[in-house]
Image (cartoon, rainbow, N blue to C red):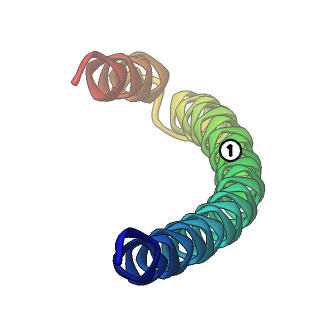
Amino acid sequence: MNEVESIPFEVFLIILGVSIASSLGALINWLRKRKNRLCEIHKELQAYQKEVKEDIDDLKKQSWRIQKTLLIMAQIMDDTLEKTHPDLRADLETIAQELLEHTHDN
């Protein structure tokens, strides 16, 4: 009777072992897929960050150009005003420079 009773227990152990092995295999497969997806997301994020950095650099360059243009225009207007109305002193270049410096401080 001992042999008959031990057969179901051995079958139970085999079934349990197969179940655990298949569950672990499924878990490992899921973790591998999850890791691969996270790597893809990380690469996409890095590409997006690179694009954003390039856009920020472009905006900084455009801002610098606009500031320089503003200073040149103020100088031209200042010179023209000085030639046409020597009695008036606007000093627009200094005002523009102060405004730009104040903008950078904020």
Position of the N terminus by quadrant:
bottom left
**Quick check: 63 above or below 102?**
below
Q: Nearer the viewer, residue 83 or 45?
A: 45
Residue 69 or 24: which is nearer the viewer? 24
Query: Residue at position x 71%, y 41% from top?
Result: 57
Residues 32 and 17: in front is 17
Question: Would you place residue 53 above or below residue 32 in this image?
Answer: above
In the rendered structure, the answer to whether residue 13 lies left or right of residue 54 reads left
Task: Depth check: give the residue in front, 54 or 97.
Answer: 54
Please, what secondary structure does the residue beneath circle 1 have? helix
Which residue is farthest front? 1
Q: In the image, what residue type sits under mark 1?
A: Lys
User: How far from the left and from the top, in percent, is residue 3?
Assistant: 46, 73
| Label 1 sits on residue | 53
In this picture, is 65 found above or below 46? above
Circle 1 crowding by C-alpha within 10 Å: few under 14, some 14–19, many from 20 = few
Residue 67's quadrant in the figure? Answer: top right
**Residue displayed at 41% across by 16% down:** 94
Q: Quadrant of residue 101?
A: top left
Residue 25 visible in the shown view? yes
Residue for point 60% across, 67% down: 21
